[in-house]
Amino acid sequence: MPFTLTRYQLGSHVIMLDVAGEIRGAAVAQLELTLLEVFIADFPRELIIDLHAATWLSSTGVNALVTGYTVAIEYGTLYRVINADHDVRHALEVAGVHDLLTNSDDVGALVLALLLR
């Protein structure tokens, strides 16, 4: 399945990125660029990354999601990754960041994730 990324405005300060397909290779660079654009241009209070249609997540894709989380902390943005299933969820769990990305209130998990990188 080809990679697609769709941006939705869910309120005045809430943005959702709907990610589909395989998150690897050039798709990772596109995801990183979109995340940075959202933070810089929109300065959202909340950013939701919906992975319901993502079919694969490489280690560089995991790093992109964690980087997005660290930037969110710098911007004071609530950052949540939702609906990761099967292989995508497994990739997040193996990297030890699933709980961190699905519950962005866990600062201890952030420290652990950064140490594991």
Image (cartoon, rainbow, N blue to C red):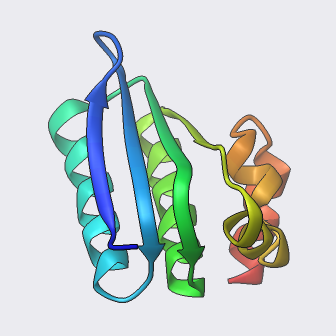
The part of the image, by quadrant, that contains residue 90 is: bottom right
Q: Residue at x 48, y 32 (%)?
A: 76
Q: Nearer the viewer, residue 77 or 54?
A: 54
Depicted 87 relative to depicted 66: above or below: below
Q: Quadrant of residue 106?
A: top right
Q: Nearer the viewer, residue 31 or 83?
A: 83
Residue beneath the point at 40% across and 45% down: 18
Name the residue furthest left: 41
Q: Is residue 113 left or right of residue 12?
A: right
**Vertical comparison of 74 with 42: above or below:** below
Q: Residue at x 50, y 76 (%)?
A: 61
- 28 or 42: which is nearer to us? 28
From the viewer's side, name the closer residue of 4 and 111. Answer: 4
Q: State the residue lying farthest toward the bottom.
A: 25
Q: Position of residue 82 (x, y in %)?
A: 63, 42
Give how far across and how far down residue 105 sits, in percent.
Answer: 74, 34
Which residue is most to the top?
Answer: 12
Q: Along the horizontal axis of the image, is 10 left or right of 89?
A: left
* Farthest front residue in view: 1
Q: How many marks?
A: 0
Please state, as top left, top right, bottom left or bottom right, where the C terminus lies in the image. bottom right
Residue plotted at (82% across, 51% down): 99
Q: Quadrant of residue 15?
A: top left
User: Residue 5 at what x, y percent from top left?
Assistant: 30, 54
Q: Position of residue 1 (x, y in %)?
A: 40, 73
Left or right side of 66 for 110:
right
